[in-house]
Image (tube, helix red, strand yellow):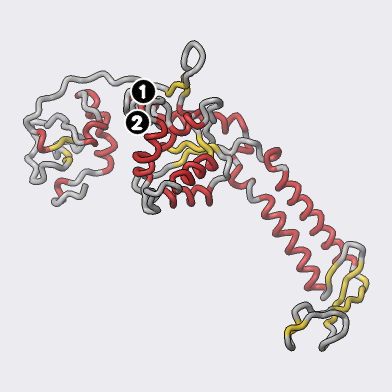
Amino acid sequence: AILAQERNRISLPTLLAAPKVMEPAGVSVGKLWAGGCSPNPQSAESSPLPTLLRADRSDGQVLYRADCADTPTPHPQPMESAQPQCVPGGEEPEEVWPPRWGITLQQFKELMEECAKDPSWRPTNTVYTLVEEYVKPRTRGTGMGYALLRNQKSPLQVEIMVSHTWAENAEEFLRTLERTVRPHDVLFICALSVYQSEDGAGPSIAQQLGASAGESPLRRVLDDILERGEDAGWRWRWRVCLQFVPKICFTIAFFLYYYTMGAAGCIPTFIGQCAVGSLVPGADTNGTPYVGNLCIFPHWKFTYVHLEPHHAIITWIALVVFVIATILCFTDKWWMGRFRGR
């Protein structure tokens, strides 16, 4: 919120310190953010903007809402520990925790294609609309988020944490992911991974978030990605640099080959010869196609000359580097490792 007066602004340190100050008083940050009241310190000044959060000027750390001035201090309520989603089957439902609430980009794309077939779907729909009108009806009564419902026979372990907003365009969100990740990368997308229905068939959103930041799905997923990455070793830590190795090799190979072509003034081969071409002038009878006077496929005549030894060496180096780059592209899962989590 933008406060009308300078003295009512909340600094970032104040905002970050708020949960620590509020927890002993039994105040839920989530409830406060949703519009609930927090204890009003006796020394606080009255606010000219009663519906806005303010910082107490005495210590700069206590947050409260001025319209709650007469509200008694609430009794601390115990907060529940985080709960998993459950997959039915067998004698007891299988508990599935956030690191396995994954969905592939291809599956998300298929969901969007289903939505697009609905006559009421609009290209301007946001992620919020996607969840309210299309995800909740599909998951209601199951106790599972869309991601787990889709993969309940074999839950997918998350490789990539996706940060998004609910107000962004759903189709643009999909296009952004298509430019960023591969079709079969396993993603954690809050809108699709968390059970959103709040119908009692499964854990509520609050129950999935847990009592502390360390229990939240986002923290659990990121910790799992970090643990798996550390197990993968140095290749995971250097993955951002390693992914450029094939591209660099291709660039070097083409540079060396075209350098030789320009320096020798001919097209180098790998048998110690160089092809010198000459364009056959004018229309001829060798089947050269013309459109009017425009030659579509000009007729060239090549003669082969000896390639200088140093140019021949550079040509062979270019070929070797090109072959290495090609092999690296087809074996990237071996030398880069299968885990690409981030």
Q: Position of residue 242 (x, y in %)?
A: 64, 46
What residue does disc 1 label? 201
Name the foreground residue: 117 vs 69: 117
Q: Secondary structure at mark 2?
A: loop
Left or right: 11 in relation to 72: right
Please give the name of the residue rendered at 15% of the width and 46% of the height, measured from the top-left corner: 8
Say which amino acid is labelled 2.
Ser
Q: Position of residue 37 (x, y in %)?
A: 16, 32
Q: Secondary structure at mark 1?
A: loop
Q: Is residue 206 something that shows in the picture?
A: no
Q: Residue furthest top?
A: 91
Q: Position of residue 275 (x, y in %)?
A: 87, 72
Q: Give the distance between the C-alpha atoms of the residues marked 2 and 1, in whole angstroms.
A: 8 Å
Please give the name of the residue rendered at 41% of the width and 31% of the height, measured from the top-left corner: 139
Residue 197: mark in rendering: 2
Name the foreground residue: 216 vs 181: 181
Q: Are marks 2 and 1 in contact (CB under 8 Å)?
A: yes
Q: Is residue 7 above or below residue 203?
A: below
Q: Is residue 125 something that shows in the picture?
A: yes
